Amino acid sequence: MSHRKIIHVDMDAFYASVEQHDNPQLRGKAIAVGGGQYGVVAAASYEARKFGIRSAMPGRKALELCPHLIVVKPRFQRYKEISQQIREIFYEYTDLVEPLSLDEAYLDVTENKKDMESANEIAREIRQKIFDKTGLTASAGISVNKFLAKVASDYNKPNGQKTIHPSQIIDFMEKLPIEKFYGIGKVTANKMHEMHIFSGKDLKERSLEELIRFFGKSGNYYYNVVRGHHKSEVKPHRIQKSVGVEETYFENLLDEQAVFKQLNIISKDLEERLGRKDIKGKTLTLKIKYKDFSVFTRSKTQDVYYGDSENLFETARNLWQLRPYDKPVRLLGLSLSNLNTHEKKQISVQLKLPFPDFE
């Protein structure tokens, strides 16, 4: 049986590492890109992560966990510049590159431009070239499909790589903690824990019917990936349709000022995500879920792309005024669609070729 050779390359604390590289005074220090009192952390250095700081964490919480945290304003143009340098390295090996964001991508190197047999060696070369060109480190995962490569890339971070050979897949998946499964978030993991599913082995013992009953369509995904089956191909022309941010509140928002404060935070978070992926959009949608779980959405499309977070926030405020009634708010969300991604579409061909030896 032939297998594909898939590499997932993931830069190590990308934004924070760029800032530490460009400013030697920040090296070895706990820094967060973005955040502050009212923002959201876009990235945290490894020194900051020791204090429990993670991306998407509210800046106020990050400062509580680490009072000496240095907050750095994002420089997305600089991140895009370096990301382009990194992608140029990827294309030296294959045209089958599927970027997930500025700092990570899948590569199908089954057939590659250098005729190299070893996917391990390709990953090592790519990581070394990235370091030589940018001064930054990357981690990589190598396996037969995207799911396994993604999981593997997180294993030896930072500045490491891991291969899951076809002969190791079953054993690896059975031992894998359920929290490490790509696509299983905290809520789903807790639900699985309640069902006494703590590892891949526990998950594998559940029938397809049972998983679908408890998790809907996702049950089919869980049933297959735990068996090493994930057929999604590397899609170099993958087009994103929308980008959004949602926040559910443990305490319902009871007044307009509280809502505006949260919309301002969400607007900044959305701006950071758009910058991360170099995406713009013309249609902004506000989503409101109330305490009684009723949902209201309203959108506004404009002729030009939305600009910064202030533009997003001002439009969100106007959409808020169109709500049909006042009730405690449980969830707020903002999303952009009608994106510029179609302008970036590159036509490429997905090759399906076997290879004899996976290494």
Image (cartoon, rainbow, N blue to C red):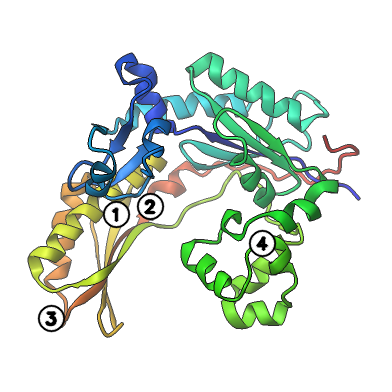
Counting from the top left corner in percent of width and height, residue 356 is at 91, 39
Instruction: Say if 165 sits above or below 222 in the image.
Output: above
89 left or right of 291? right
Q: CA distance from mark 1 to mark 4?
A: 43 Å
For the point 47% across and 29% down, the residue is 83
From mark 3 to mark 1, how far is it between C-alphas? 28 Å
Mark 1 residue type = Lys
- Marks 1 and 4, the one that precedes in the sequence: 4
Q: Nearer the viewer, residue 153 or 193?
A: 193
- Which residue lies under the disc numbered 1? 282
Confirm or deny contact between disc 2 and disc 1 (CB under 8 A): yes
Which residue is at the front of the view, 169 or 143? 169
Please state if 251 lies on the left or on the right of 243 as rendered: left
Mark 3 or 1, which is nearer the eye? 3
Q: Are marks 4 and 3 in contact (CB under 8 Å)?
A: no
Q: What residue appears at the point 60 percent right and 75 percent down from the top-left corner?
A: 217
Q: Are marks 1 and 4 in contact (CB under 8 Å)?
A: no
Disc 2: which residue: 339
Q: Amino acid at mark 3?
A: Asp
